[in-house]
């Protein structure tokens, strides 16, 4: 059962009930940020990558990962960032997502039993980046972070051996966008994957098929939908 706590907006002084979210680790165990009851929420004025994410520790497998920092939107228009402590609280996994501890799944898409992907609704460009990062973690990529090199368009994400591009614009991704991502990934000896909110031009899809770049379409629920065969294969097998 998720924890619900009252939060008072420092701008309008109104109080709302906030339900603490939980996120699924790559091992399948939910983790959740622990709110700091001694600290007050702050208004979000400027966005910064390090402030939008919080490092959580999974008590089941020991992994540490970055997850969205808890925020709450007040009806007065103020975005509130809720303070957290350094620890995490384990959440009991849903019965249908728990894997037997004594068994190891065999390779192959027909024997993998990953938990159901849970994302965030997309309302802003940051939400699109968050959804893509959550999906990459669900696939099995650890240490998802902001890419050091900025892409030609959108926002870059990186993980060991992987480079991803998230395009939250309203125009379909072009062939040049896909080719630039592929070239940058090749220079870093990494795989690559592209996420777009507006879809892809025909030339971009054809080029991605030729270069074997997985293409995903982000819908407003935050769920990535495979667009080509490379993306469908990645979605089925995971990282």
Image (cartoon, rainbow, N blue to C red):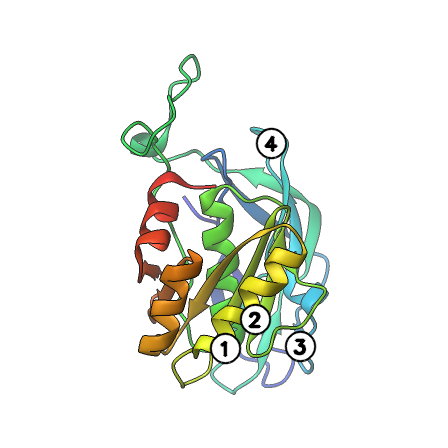
Q: Are marks 1 and 2 in contact (CB under 8 Å)?
A: yes
Cα separation, mark 4 vs mark 1, equals: 43 Å
Residue 128 visible in image: yes
Which residue is identified by label 3?
47
* C-alpha separation, residue under disc 4 versus residue under disc 3: 29 Å
Write the residue at 58% across / 85% down.
12
In the rendered image of this protein, does residue 128 appear above or below residue 225? Answer: below
Residue under pointer 1: 176
Q: Earlier in the sequence, mark 4 or mark 3?
A: 3
Q: Is residue 219 left or right of residue 152?
A: left
Query: What is the crowding at mark 2: few (fewer than 14 residues within 10 Å), some, or many (at least 20)?
Result: some
Q: In the rendered view, would you say 233 is above or below 104?
A: below
- Gap in angstroms between the C-alphas marked 1 and 2: 6 Å
Q: CA distance from mark 2 to mark 4?
A: 39 Å
Residue carrying label 4: 59
Q: Residue at x 56, y 71 (%)?
A: 180
Element under label 3? loop
Q: Residues within 10 Å of mark 4 (few under 14, many from 20)?
A: some
Q: Which residue is mark 2?
A: 180
Q: Residues within 10 Å of mark 3 (few under 14, many from 20)?
A: few
- Dot 4: what SS? loop
> Which of label 3 and label 2 is nearer to you?
2
């Amino acid at each position: 059962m998720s924890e619900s706590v009252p939060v008072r907006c420092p701008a309008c002084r109104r109080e709302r009930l906030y339900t603490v979210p939980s996120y699924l680790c790559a091992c399948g165990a939910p983790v959740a940020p622990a709110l700091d009851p001694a600290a007050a929420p702050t208004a979000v004025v400027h966005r910064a990558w390090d402030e939008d994410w919080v490092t959580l520790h999974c008590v089941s497998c020991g992994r540490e990962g970055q997850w969205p920092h808890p925020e709450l939107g007040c009806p007065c228009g103020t975005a509130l960032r809720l303070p957290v402590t350094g620890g995490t609280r384990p959440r009991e996994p849903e019965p249908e997502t728990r894997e037997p501890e004594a068994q190891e799944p065999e390779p192959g898409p027909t024997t993998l039993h990953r938990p159901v992907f849970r994302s965030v609704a997309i309302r802003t460009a940051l939400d699109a980046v968050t959804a893509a990062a959550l999906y990459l973690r669900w696939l099995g990529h650890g240490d998802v972070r902001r890419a050091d090199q900025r892409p030609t368009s959108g926002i870059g994400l990186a993980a060991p051996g992987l480079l991803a591009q998230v395009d939250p614009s309203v125009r379909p991704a072009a062939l040049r966008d896909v080719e630039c991502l592929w070239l940058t990934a090749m220079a870093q000896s990494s795989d690559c994957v592209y996420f777009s909110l507006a879809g892809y031009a025909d030339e971009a899809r054809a080029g991605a098929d030729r270069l074997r770049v997985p293409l995903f379409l982000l819908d407003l629920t935050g769920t990535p939908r495979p667009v080509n065969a490379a993306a469908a294969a990645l979605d089925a097998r995971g990282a």
